[in-house]
Image: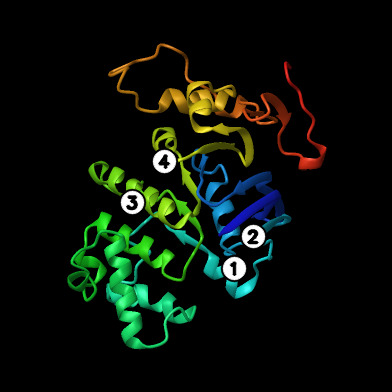
Amino acid sequence: MTSVRVTDLVKDYSIRTGLKRTRLRAVDHVNLELVPGRTVALVGESGSGKSTIAKILTHMETPTSGSVDVRLDDGTAVHKARYRREVQMVFQDPFASLNPFHSIEHHIARPLRIHKRTANAAETRQRVLEMLERVNLTPASNFAPRRPHELSGGQRQRVAIARALAPGAQVLIADEPVSMLDVSIRLGVLNLLGRLQREDSLAVLYITHDLATARHFSDEITVLYRGRVVERGPSDAVILDPHHEYTKLLALAAPDPERPGRVTSADPVDRAAIDNSRCYDHFAGEWVEAGVPSGDAVGTAGR
């Protein structure tokens, strides 16, 4: 089993405007912990830094500062090829994440061969069929020779999940895995992820902008706004008792069957005016400074 500790993660981008360069801070001293058997939902609007964190965790981006510490249950640090095997990602768009020229069998067999999880072609094929069965693509022998365009969006995303788990990944980064799918099949994919997590005791980072699915699927919610964590805690606590103004705004926008057709008369919220300098920590029951190194955070309960 594998755990991940993200400490004071910072990511800056240099933006050129004419002859001038300015700095954009996409991620500002973010701390996260992913442990086996639990799901952390990273919630925020587009541009809040969610996908940047996912890319850093999967080594597609290099952090400006901070650390990502991945360790096995015996405390052994995970690096290089072992890291790429242990930490895998399910991308948002199943229509773009699979190569249309290759079969479904090829997509799952390739990580098995790259990470040397099978010894020969026969073993590889058997393992491919097993992975397809695990994600409920049955009979697997019918799906293996197909091309991605022959599958529905939900089926393609199941293939993407099987591909991510094929090398034996213990940490799964799911970047809005159901946002491109029809509403009618989203729950099925989330339930599949939940079952696989329980069976393999996976550590899962579920990235989304939807509080409703975050509450359904995750144990803990971390709310990100303009690169900073502004609220964190158990899922029910964050959803039912939000403290930060941005979290309240997200909760208000989430669908609620108990308030059908609800229309608010409140004035539109100016997002630029929302303060992201403080974070409410439900675990500690207090406000702390956001966007500063963890060792320098100061409790501000009752401010």
Residue 70: image tag? 2
Please state which amino acid type lies under the numbered disc 4.
Phe
Expressed as whole percent of the image width and height from the top left, the position of residue 301 reads: 73, 20
Which residue is rendered at x = 51% and y = 46% of the image? 38
The quarter of the displayed image where residue 277 is located? top right
Establish if 290 lies above or below 31.
above
Which residue is rendered at x = 51% and y = 21% of the image? 269
Dot 4 or dot 1: first in sequence order is 1
Alpha carbon of mark 4 to alpha carbon of mark 1: how far? 25 Å
In depth, the one of 69 and 58 nearer the eye is 69
Q: Is there a contact, CB below 8 Å, between mark 2 and mark 4?
A: no
The quarter of the displayed image where residue 129 is located? bottom left
Residue count near mark 2 (Cα–Cα under 10 Å), binned few <14, some 14–19, many ≥20: many
Residue 10: image tag? none
Residue 192: image tag? 3
The quarter of the displayed image where residue 30 is located? top right
In depth, the one of 100 and 188 nearer the eye is 188
SS type, badge 1:
helix
Q: Is there a contact, CB below 8 Å, between mark 2 and mark 1?
A: yes
Alpha carbon of mark 1 to alpha carbon of mark 3: how far? 24 Å
Residue 217: image tag? 4
Alpha carbon of mark 4 to alpha carbon of mark 3: how far? 11 Å
Q: Can the viewer see residue 194 in this picture?
A: yes
Expressed as whole percent of the image width and height from the top left, the position of residue 222 reads: 56, 38
Residue 83: image tag? 1
Of all residues, the one furthest to the top in this rendering is: 265
Establish if 8 lies above or below 303.
below
Dot 4 or dot 3: first in sequence order is 3
Please state which amino acid type lies under the numbered disc 1.
Tyr
SS type, badge 2:
strand
Please state which amino acid type lies under the numbered disc 2.
Val
